Amino acid sequence: MLRLTKVSYNFGSNWALKNISFTLHKGDFLFLTGPSGAGKTTLLRLLYGALPLTRGLAQVAGFQLKGLHRRQLPQLRRQIGVVFQDFKILPLRTAFDNVALALEVRGTPQQLVERRVRAVLRALELEDKAHVQCEKLSGGEQQRVAIARSVVINPQLILADEPTGNLDPELSTRLMDVFKQFHTFGTTIIMATHSPDIVHSQPEAKVLHLEHGGIAAASFPLDEVEGVPEEWL
């Protein structure tokens, strides 16, 4: 499903990621932990193709990210559901329309769109907000709309950056139940979080702890990389 080999990324002189190597298999659940600035969001953005991979190799959902052509990005992103901290929802569209858009751009029949969107909104306790413009929703409700949009496409891989950050404990628990349901059906999930309670809620998950852009600790064996070409480093 996903393999990273000596992945590094820099913003000018600042190395946000340094020599990241690990493998995930289909159906794995991985928590990315670490302090702010450790590189969690940068790593997620690389996996989604929002940042170009310039050092190292990364294979995600069957796509090799090194040298990935721009026209291949939509194909990659059809396999990935993404929940980032800034939501990226359309404020003047309703909650239903925001979630439905993820299916409509894929050419999903309207009857199926209706059924799947309502099911996901119900699971996230947003059914009564379906026809409310997103600019009128609270921050927590907007976060749940973003999550609904990411999971409604039944992605192979879900990338979630602090998805419970704006939610109270009860809604955080319900949200984790939604992620667990997708995980049960074989979806691979990578979730960045600061919350020990969230990590403890999924005891069988793998944990990768980042500090200063590098891997400080891992709860699973990491790949041993040998013979890496000098130009990757």
Image (cartoon, grey):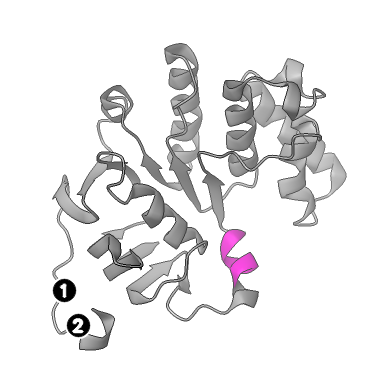
* Residue 180 screen position, x and y as percent: 44, 32
Query: Depth check: 144 or 205 in front?
Result: 144
Label 2 to label 1, Cα distance in Å?
Answer: 7 Å
Give residue 228's mark. Answer: 2
The image position of residue 186, as x and y in percent, is 45, 47
In this rendering, position of residue 157 left or right of residue 223: right
Residue at 64 percent across and 66 percent down: it is: 74
Residue shown at 34%/57% (left/top)?
A: 25
**Residue 129 in view of the camera:** yes
- Nearer-the-camera pick, 125 or 37: 37
The tag on residue 76 is none
Amino acid type at circle 1 is Val
User: Is residue 129 in the magenta section?
Assistant: no
Q: How many C-alpha atoms fall within 10 Å of the one at disc 2: few (<14), some, or many (≥20)?
A: few
Judged by its main secondary structure, the magenta piece is helix
Q: Are marks 2 and 1 in contact (CB under 8 Å)?
A: yes
What stretch of residues is rendered in magenta?
73-78
Q: Quadrant of the C terminus?
A: bottom left
Residue 27 visible here: no
Say which quadrant the N terminus sits in.
Answer: bottom left
Q: Amino acid at mark 2?
A: Val
| Dot 1 alpha-carbon crowd within 10 angstroms: few under 14, some 14 to 19, many 20 or more | few
Find residue 128 and report its image quarter.
Answer: top right
The residue pinned by badge 1 equals: 225
Q: Find numbered disc 1 in the image and state the secondary structure of the residue it sits on.
A: loop
Vertically, is 61 above or below 113? below
Quick one: which residue is furthest to the front in this view?
13
